[in-house]
Image (cartoon, helix red, strand yellow):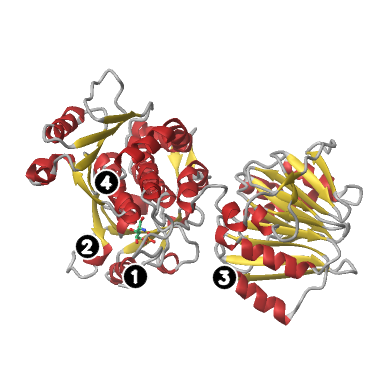
């Protein structure tokens, strides 16, 4: 989820580019850069790690005076957080900034043979590919179009060349790109918020389109360079509304973008044909994977619940490996014992949670290898682990964690698949996991689209309650815990998550008509048991909502039921959780709360 900007006109490009990048910093900021062409068509490039302020320091020392340029703020996907990996990337006379993922970058890199790459990024491969087409007889637009025909993945790109200094070439597939029309100047950005204050007249590029942008205007083409009619629209709303993607809150945007962010998480990590999966960042050989006998999963809050859910799957998929899931703030003070051949998964969205970081250090000190399951690239946890994987959910702005949870679970499931594969685990189970993981983004999209209105109506019905129980068995139990956390942290309703089987051991004393209960009920071996718990609650006047994948043929008596239609056998709990996320969101909105910044909370708890 990077931010890209471009400018060509009569003003100094640098200030316009930097201001635009600042507007896009919420999209990710582990590094940034700009490249410009001065009036002699001489290129200048400035890049830095860290926030835009670091780039401004570089530019203060060596300002750019060119009137054409491009800029980029990076949320790393391929390649660590280094200046070399920061955009813009150069190849020959061309400079390029890119938002998206080139899935076949390794294949393209191999075809570019002797080219000397300076970075680990997929983007530099695209720049080199364009350059390889850009001979004296080929225009920049033509070279870009030819190269993009060989690309698989997503892109929003802006390219310029010192050889053709009067134009910027842009193209998009899957990543937004907007062209702002000024008087003898043209602006480009990945998000309209960067254009506000300069122009509200814009051309929203569509997938498969390319445009040649000059001071005079925009020449819209397809990848065969056939001319297309450009439709000028008006940019509506203010910067904040645009950054939320048109949603009222970042939380809703982050819930609804889970299909897209999960595709980024899974990108290049599952080979469906072979039914195999790989997390490159773990750097573990098959032998080392086979030697693992115990996995400790460490986290706080939602990260802990993601680990708890993953542990159920690890036990199912790799039964000979034992798991232990611990709350970091407790574990760090226990005199815990680490069995031989233990590894630890350190789960954290921010990568800065103090208790989780303390556990990382303690476990490492005891000689066990620690692997990060982290979202924020370059974060402290990401830098201190022995290896691991970024979950690539993109910046999670809302304090309540939603898309990161889903991506964390998916990443740990890939780890489970790797363990099983290395140990000669059951091929059909591994293949089933690979198949459902690959289908998960679409299933989440279908779940959200199909049931959004039902969930919103449920929220309106139950928003005034002050007490709730969330219940689930087996892999739905961690989901019940996560659902209760989501509701309590944004609606301030007292919500507790419990194992359904635990109801009769005390919590059922709470149940009366002032409570509502959300039951996560999975079809299959524990269905009848789950119905038992539901009946206990209803017999005591509790208002029961059931979220289930059980078909209508399985009768359920409840106050409200949402039935998912899915063929999933493994990952249904993740689908049920997206309904809980939406439910909590709408209840919080109905209660007039600050959904993105709930009272008393911080996005990252860096204190103990
Ligand atoms: C989740 O919605 C909460 N914001 C909180 O529990 C969070 O999951 C916890 O603080 C851990 O944060 P981390 O993933 O950044 O380490």
Binning the other alpha carbons within 10 Å of mark 3 as few (below 14), some (14 to 19) or many (20 upward) gives some
Binning the other alpha carbons within 10 Å of mark 1 as few (below 14), some (14 to 19) or many (20 upward) gives some
Give the SS element for disc 2. Answer: loop
Mark drawn on residue 338: 2
Q: How much space separates mark 4 and mark 1, taking CA atoms? A: 23 Å
Q: How much space separates mark 3 and mark 4, taking CA atoms? A: 35 Å
Q: Is residue 48 left or right of residue 169?
A: left
Where is mark 3, residue-wise? 50
Binning the other alpha carbons within 10 Å of mark 2 as few (below 14), some (14 to 19) or many (20 upward) gives some
Where is mark 4, residue-wise? 478
Q: Are marks 2 and 4 in contact (CB under 8 Å)?
A: no
Q: Are marks 1 and 2 in contact (CB under 8 Å)?
A: no
Ligand 1 within 8 angstroms of badge 3 C-beta: no
Give the SS element for disc 4. Answer: helix
Q: Is residue 64 above or below residue 563?
A: below
- Mark 4 or 1 closer to N-term? 1
Q: Residue at x 39, y 52 (%)?
A: 592
Give the SS element for disc 1. Answer: helix
Q: How much space separates mark 1 and mark 2, taking CA atoms? A: 21 Å
Q: Is residue 395 left or right of residue 385?
A: right
Task: Decide which of 140, 431 is in the foreground and name it.
Answer: 140
Where is mark 1, residue-wise? 354
- Mark 3 or 2 closer to N-term? 3
Q: Position of residue 147 (x, y in %)?
A: 75, 44
């Amino acid at each position: 989820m990077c931010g890209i900007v471009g400018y060509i006109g009569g003003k100094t490009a640098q200030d316009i580019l930097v201001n635009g990048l600042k507007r896009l910093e919420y999209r990710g900021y582990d590094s940034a850069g700009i490249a410009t062409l001065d009036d002699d068509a001489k290129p200048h490039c400035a890049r830095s790690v860290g926030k835009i302020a670091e780039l401004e320091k570089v530019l203060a020392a060596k300002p750019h005076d060119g009137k054409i340029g491009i800029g980029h703020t990076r949320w790393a996907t391929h390649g660590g957080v280094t200046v070399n990996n920061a955009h813009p990337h150069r190849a020959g006379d061309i400079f390029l900034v890119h938002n998206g993922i080139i899935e076949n970058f390794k294949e393209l890199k191999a075809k570019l043979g002797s080219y000397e790459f300076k970075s680990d990024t997929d983007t530099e491969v695209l720049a080199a590919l364009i350059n390889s087409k850009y001979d004296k007889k080929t225009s920049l637009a033509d070279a870009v179009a030819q190269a993009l025909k060989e690309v698989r993945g997503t892109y929003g790109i802006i390219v310029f060349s010192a050889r053709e200094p009067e134009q910027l070439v842009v193209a998009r597939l899957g990543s937004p790109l907007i062209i702002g029309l000024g008087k003898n100047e043209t602006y480009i950005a990945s998000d309209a918020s960067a254009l506000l204050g300069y122009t509200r007249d814009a051309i929203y590029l569509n997938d498969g389109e390319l445009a040649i942008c000059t001071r005079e205007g925009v020449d819209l083409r397809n990848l065969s360079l056939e001319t297309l009619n450009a439709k000028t629209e008006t940019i509506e709303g203010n910067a904040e509304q645009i950054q939320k993607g048109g949603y009222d809150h970042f939380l809703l945007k982050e819930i609804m973008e889970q299909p897209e962010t999960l595709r980024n998480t899974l990108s290049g990590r599952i080979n469906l044909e072979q039914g195999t999966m790989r997390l490159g960042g773990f750097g573990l050989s098959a032998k080392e994977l086979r030697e693992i006998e115990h996995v400790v999963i460490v986290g706080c809050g939602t990260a802990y619940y993601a680990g708890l859910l993953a542990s159920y799957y690890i036990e199912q998929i790799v039964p000979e490996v034992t798991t232990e899931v611990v709350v970091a703030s407790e574990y760090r003070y226990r005199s815990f014992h680490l069995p031989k051949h233990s590894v630890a998964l350190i789960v954290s969205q921010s990568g800065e949670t103090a208790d989780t970081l303390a556990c990382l250090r303690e476990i490492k000190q005891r000689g066990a290898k620690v692997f990060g399951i982290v979202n924020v690239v370059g974060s402290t946890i990401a830098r201190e682990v022995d290896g691991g994987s970024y979950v690539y959910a993109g910046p999670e702005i809302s304090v309540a964690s939603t898309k990161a949870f889903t991506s964390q679970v998916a990443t740990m499931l890939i780890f489970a698949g790797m363990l099983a594969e290395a140990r000669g685990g059951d091929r059909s189970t591994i293949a089933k996991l690979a198949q459902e993981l690959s289908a998960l983004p679409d299933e989440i999209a279908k779940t959200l689209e199909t049931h959004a209105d039902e969930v919103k109506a449920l929220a309106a019905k139950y928003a005034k309650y002050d007490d709730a129980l969330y219940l689930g068995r087996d892999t739905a139990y961690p989901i019940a815990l996560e659902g209760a956390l989501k509701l309590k942290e944004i609606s301030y309703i007292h919500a507790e998550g419990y194992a359904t089987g635990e109801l009769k051991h005390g919590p059922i004393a709470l149940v009366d008509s002032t409570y509502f209960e959300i039951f996560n009920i999975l079809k299959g071996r524990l269905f009848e048991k789950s119905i038992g718990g539901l009946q206990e609650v209803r017999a005591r006047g509790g208002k029961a909502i059931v979220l289930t994948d059980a078909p209508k043929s399985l009768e359920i008596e409840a106050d409200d039921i949402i039935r998912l239609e899915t063929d999933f056998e493994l990952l249904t709990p993740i689908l049920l959780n997206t309904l809980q996320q939406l439910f909590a969101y709408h209840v919080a909105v109905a209660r007039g709360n600050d959904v993105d910044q709930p009272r008393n909370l911080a996005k990252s708890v860096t204190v103990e």
